[in-house]
Image (spheres, grey):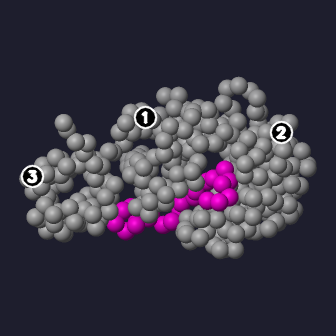
Amino acid sequence: METKKKDIRALTKEQLRNFFVKEGDQAFRGNQVYEWLWSKGAHSFEDMTNISKETRQMLEDNFVINHIRVDTMQKSNDGTIKNAVRLHDGLTVESVLIPTKSRTTACVSSQVGCSLDCRFCATSRLKRMRNLNPDEIFDQVVAIDNESRLYYDKPLSNIVFMGMGEPLMNYNNVLKAIDKITSDEGLGMSPKRIVVSTSGVPKMIKKMADDEVKFKLAVSLHSAIDEVRTSIMPFNETFPLADLREALEYWYAKTKNRITYEYVVWKDINDKKKDVDALIAFCKFAPSKVNLIEYNPIDDGEFQQAPDQAIDMYVSMLEANNITVTVRRSRGKDIDAACGQLANKS
């Protein structure tokens, strides 16, 4: 009976070194293989050209590299690229490359489907099938970095965890992936250029603060009134705004990093003055910034983009209260690559 080969990227560098010693080889061989896997993004043992044929065969006999494959790549009229990424077990997630004049941003997924139930988001309609492993998250970034260099002639500059899934419900793997992405032995990217976006899991926000993470935090808020937020994000009943606010106060006290709120304004849902008043009150306890995001319909018409007057009201009232606000126009809408549209239609 054939034993199942272990995914080599689940091993630490120390474990790889020990493996080679046990096989009667030198420990430094483990360093070489580790570099191939994480710095050079090798997809097969054959790629590891500074290692002997016998050693490569021995690795082949013992391990697999469960790398992702970009199944289909779609390019939007505005230059946005969406990848349908096939995982080693046949499941699919999506990731997006968003280019601007000065930078390119990768929007990556952390789960197949999603653990949460936001009613305006296409991804939440796919049940969560599993968490992504650290190497599957890492691979999405490598693929987008390659596309950024190929199509835009520059390396990837920023990463947002705003693809499929709730990152804080896959906390350990997300942290391990970021560790590899930011490590000098991995991609060497600055953690300050990484944003983890959460719908708000208070216990995990506190844990992030305790773990002294160096990346930035964004909260998908959409309403600072409990009843309204619960109507669009039903899990708010389990994690109400008071708990979220307490966790964010704790985060700010520990990290001194300002909080970004992602916020969509919908017609007849959160487009009144009282909604803005509540948001202003919610923003006051710690330095924050509000990104007002254009809504991308997901077919059924229940949620509709608020008129421009409502957006203008938000902007002027927030600015009058000295709260930084940006209006974000959606990218990649024509290929269903915009916020809330990732649903594996391809």
Q: Residue at x 42, y 53 (%)?
A: 134
The residues colored magenta run: 182-204
Rate crowding at label 3 as few (under 14), some (14 to 19) or many (20 or more) other CA atoms within 10 Å. Answer: few
Q: Nearer the viewer, residue 112 or 274?
A: 112
Q: Nearer the viewer, residue 298 or 129?
A: 129
Give whichever of discs 1 and 2 has the lower sequence position.
1
Secondary structure beneath dot 1 equals loop
Residue under label 1: 91
Q: Nearer the viewer, residue 72 or 44?
A: 44
Disc 1 + disc 3, Cβ < 8 Å: no
Rendering coords of residue 181 (x, y %): 42, 60
Say left or right for 282 vs 14. right
Rate crowding at label 1 as few (under 14), some (14 to 19) or many (20 or more) other CA atoms within 10 Å. Answer: few
Distance from the alpha carbon under mark 1 to that under mark 3: 32 Å
Asked if residue 204 shows in the view, the reply is yes
Amino acid carrying label 2: it is: Ile
Give whichever of discs 2 and 3 has the lower sequence position.
3
Say left or right for 64 vs 139. left
Amino acid carrying label 1: it is: Leu
Residue under label 3: 53
